[in-house]
Image (cartoon, coloured by chain):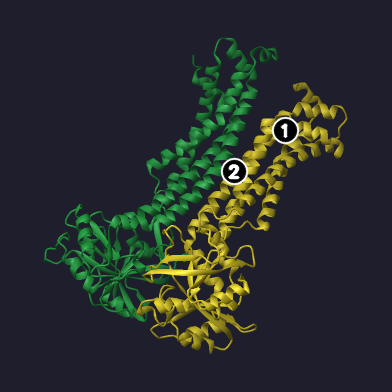
Chain colours: A green, B yellow
Amino acid sequence: MALPLVYNLESVRARWRTTIVAILGIAGTVGVFVAMLALAKGFQAALVTSGDPDNAFIRRAGATSELDSAITLDQLRPLEDAAEVQRAADGGALASPEVVVVAALPLKKTGTDANAQVRGVTPRALEVHRAVKVTEGRFFQKGLLEMVVGRNAVRSYKGIAPGDTLRLGGTSWTIVGVMDSNGSAFDSEIWCDADLLNSTFQRPAGVYQSVTMRLTSRDALNALAARVAADPRLKVQVERETDYYAKASRMMTTMILGLGSIVALVMGVGAVFAALNTMYSAVAERTREVATIRAVGFGGGSVIVSFVLEALFVSLAGGLLGCVAVLPLNGLTTSTMNFQTFSHLAFAFRVTPLLLGFGLVFALLMGLAGGVPPAIRAARLPVTAALRDL
Amino acid sequence: MLKFWPLLLAYLTRRKTRTVLTVGSFAVSLFLFCLLVTIRAGFQQGVQAAGADRLVVINKVSLIQPLPLAYRDRILKVPGIKEATYANWFGGVYQDERNFFAQFAIDHTTYRQMFPEFVVPDDQWRAFEADKQAAIAGEATAKRFGWKVGDRIPIKGAIFPGNWEFNLVGIYKGRRPNDDLTQFWFRWDHLIEKAPDWAKGFVGWYTVRVEPGADAVAVTKDIDSRFANSPWETRTQSEQAFMASFVEQMGNIGFLMTVIGGVVFFTLLLVAGNTMAMSVRERTGELAVLKTVGFTDRTVLMLVLAEVTLIALIGGAIGIGLAKLFTLRGDPTNGMFASFYLPPSAMAVGAALTLLVGLVAGLIPATTAMRLQVVHALRKL
């Protein structure tokens, strides 16, 4: 037979002081746990949404990122001619050969330099990267020293608002527009004409670092990869664009999750101690109550269930409080250096329902760990001895 | 005080579970504190270990862009500069991309003098000078992959394509506990011999040493002005500022970790403190009895304070000790941190914090106990 829940609620209320301490301990732990997950998730999402599942991303075989890759013009042509590549209205291939340069620009916040990714593209790039939209001003014109900046880049760096002039590699570039790709890595980038960027940095003309191509269908990737592998002229690796970006986030995400889980684990142990203390003192204070309950016919099992439920209730309250506390983080933009691309990346925290679910499960686990041993002690109280104290 | 020892002991064992849990709470908080300090120090490592008299010269565009090798002689002509060395970032992959560690192609004729904090035995350095394919690894990296002197290390080039193989001829140690022991050095002349044409005649960056007494700021400006308006403009910074720029860029992550963790650390301490306050409140009656049998107010105060500080200190010592053991095992993220070291100063701060929280947590119930009106308290019994 189960004890009524009201009994537990009342007893929680009666010892509100220690209960609040236990709730705060669990709330803090769950809050940090969820915040860390949201940070890693947001970082990953910023990179993964940069990719388009309908696009193929091509770089030199063996290159770990765009920075150390090279694709020459005579490799580009057969790639563009591949049957798996979609054609634009004018018959040209929907392929975007791109050049990447990392430029140190001063951050607004600290005044110190951070690495911004400058991407040289062709006007075709907007048709391949469908998520990128020009929201202010206009796109750069081919052959002119003009730049379009991502919306997060404008916010992060000094002196790159539309109308500004940026000195880069000994040349002056005019900022003509702002682009928005809904929080992806492109929002932290600066785009300009690929050929001009190459010549500004004394690089050989006609050498690109990556090519992104729109596939005729999502399933055409394997056919394209097979065609490329069979062509002796092409020493390149073909990947789905989303996969490439997922990999580019791996190192940082692993680090955040690794450190985050160590910290959360240690805190979890601390919170369990707090919960144990609360529950043990609850048991100690209610020795007579428990004995009375047993004496009127409730079994040891009912007592255990009752106390565990009480602990779960406390931990759930803590978990909910922790989740509510981190909700405002959702969408908050922060930034860090991605060592895999050697550039600064702005991204937003993502507090998803799944992560909140993880947080609550973590809270309940802490509640179980903190509730079961005291509950067992309560059930084992010798009834007669406890009643004699009355 | 010693004669009260049995009494103190009796207090501590009065509710064993609670004592253990409170000690445990303190231990966990202090462990967390030390862990966060270590993580933070790991992020800051480069800044703290930077040489005070060294400048770093990089391409003005960014570290990724190279500088001509010909700049070396021109830099050495700048008044106030004593020596210069150069290096390249290799960025290769050992077995798997996850096995990240920094690989530098270094100038074997000048690098050792520039970085005296890295200690290489003389015979190993001579072997490095004698063999073009030679390499030297940091103690931490050698330990991580189980390398021994004499091993052949294959690394897959990324920036510099191809399969590279190096003969490990030496392992360097650090002079200070927070020196970066994860680097892997090989010879720059070997890199350039095998590198594609675009890399020939270029280096990644220069490190120069300013003569004692020379004005570092003036030297910095002098270097940059010499190369202004060339296709390869330079940006010269103190090594410390150069390292700090990396930390700034990592910025938010390290900051978030420490702030969030700091808040939680204090919450946990409060939890522990509250438990102790609670246990003193429960004993009001007992304390009244003590006073009745003739204990002075002062003695009661001291007894309570001694009990809480003892609990706090035992817990704190366990936490700090475990944290030290944990950090001695090395970087748990495998390669993200150049050093994972808990400085003794942080341990001292941790101990001080524990004592402080213990005293503050004990003070309120202890003064209540001291002011206790015996008659009132006994009536409650």
Which quarter of the rendered picture does the C terminus of chain B lie within? Answer: top right
Give how far apart the Cα atoms at labels 1 and 2 are.
Answer: 20 Å
Residue displayed at 69% across by 46% down: B317
Amino acid found under the numbered disc labelled 1:
Val
Q: Is residue B281 above or below residue A178?
A: above
> Which residue occupies the foreground of this view, B217 or A324?
B217
Q: Position of residue A238 (x, y in %)?
A: 27, 60
Q: Residues within 10 Å of mark 2 (few under 14, many from 20)?
A: many
Q: Secondary structure at mark 1?
A: helix
> Which residue occupies the foreground of this view, A358 or A347?
A358
Name the residue tied to disc 2: B267
Q: Position of residue B286 (x, y in %)?
A: 78, 27
Q: Which mark is residue B280?
A: 1
Q: Is residue A303 above or below residue A195?
A: above
Disc count in the image? 2
Q: Is residue B78 above or below residue B135?
A: below
Amino acid found under the numbered disc labelled 2:
Thr
User: Seen in the image, is B2 located left or right of residue B323?
Assistant: right
Residue displayed at 63% across by 18% down: A381
> Which residue occupies the foreground of this view, A119 or A84?
A84
Are the numbered discs 1 and 2 placed on the same chain, yes or no? yes
Q: Secondary structure at mark 2?
A: helix
